[in-house]
Image (tube, helix red, strand yellow):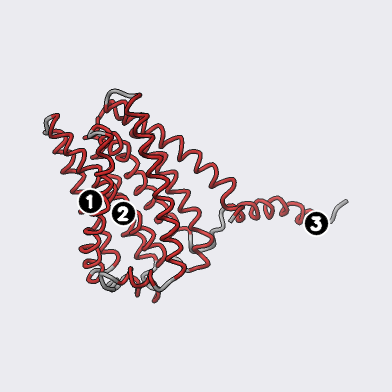
Amino acid sequence: MPSATESEARATRPTTWLRGVLHAWIPVRVGEWRPLFWCWLYVFCVLCSYYVIRPIRDAMGIDGGVRNLQWLFSATLICMLLANLPFAALARRLTRARFIAVAYRFFIVNLLVFAVLLSLGTRGQSIWIGRVFFVWVSVFNLFVVSVFWELVVDVFNDDQGKRLFALMAAGATLGAIVGATVTATLNHLVGPVGLLVISAMLLEVALRCVRHIAPIYARDQHFRSQFTAIGGTVLAGISRTIHSPYLINICVYMLLFSMASTTLYFEQANVIHRTFASGASRVTFFATLDLVGNALTLLLQILLTGKIV
């Protein structure tokens, strides 16, 4: 007959084993669940919002003429450079929470304005609205996603980042999957106008998540200091990059990646332009493409990325 101590040890082995497995896959410690949840929901909504409108952007880019895509990319670069000026000016004066609120509300208003313009515009006007929208969405994506990572880098320390950022990245991928699914499913029902409104609503939910993140660390001196004015100068980022071999290598990597992905994007646009005749079918196809791509990405993140890193 086994002793009481041996029986208790056997009973606790499955629980201990299960905890070990869960900790290996979900390495969250006590006190981290609440901030992780709100940050996860935040990035989920941001990527969901973006992937709702991304297929619309891509389809509008083709509608405006495949040969004009190179000019739209050039316009995107110019607009990104110009947008950095007011972006940096606001960052110098506002706290992170306030800055995110101002930036996201600006983009929400923009989305609603585009919805109104598309609902009232003629066919000829819609072509030009689509070209402006193509450039705007690229700028939108840059700022709403980068602002999220700038915030969470201040919320979590280095050790927490190594353990938790992969979970947030998975949340971002899941948001992309849901956003693409929404567009693929609802495009023929609500059209681009309805999808723009849905995107704006998701961005508002993301903004409200920020309001829940700040109080969690309200008593933490480090976190309070991060919710003072951000500071810096307009050229501070350029100066920091030039003096950092690490950042320069990241820039070179992004340059090469962008060159390769842009070339593939142009080829993809040519194929879709020849294959699909209507804008609605192109939107649905682009959404389906995003859905499949992000589903495969999530699968790789869960099964391989963590192990490789």
Of the residues shown, which amino acid type is indicated by label 2? Val
Asked where in the image residue 231 lies, by quadrant, the reply is bottom left
Camera-nearest residue between 117 and 59 = 59
Q: State the image coordinates of residue 215 (x, y, percent, origin top left).
A: 35, 65
Q: Nearer the viewer, mark 2 or mark 3?
A: 2
User: Against 306, is 52 above or below?
Assistant: above
Query: Disc 1, disc 3: CB below 8 Å?
Result: no
Camera-nearest residue between 106 and 70 = 70
Query: Could you say which disc has been placed on residue 144 in the image?
Result: 2
Of the residues shown, which amino acid type is indicated by label 1? Phe
Q: Nearer the viewer, mark 1 or mark 3?
A: 1
Mark 2 lies on a secondary structure that is helix
> Which of disc 1 and disc 2 is earlier in sequence?
1
Camera-nearest residue between 17 and 5 = 17
> Which of disc 3 and disc 2 is earlier in sequence?
3
Mark 1 lies on a secondary structure that is helix
Q: State the image coordinates of residue 54 (x, y, percent, origin top left).
A: 32, 40
Asked where in the image residue 213 lies, by quadrant, the reply is bottom left
Residue where numbered disc 1 is placed: 107
Query: Could you say which disc has been placed on residue 4 in the image?
Result: 3
Camera-nearest residue between 244 and 295 = 244
User: Mark 2: few, some, or many residues within 10 Å (few <14, many ≥20)?
Assistant: many
> Which of disc 3 and disc 1 is earlier in sequence?
3
Query: Disc 2, disc 1: CB below 8 Å?
Result: yes
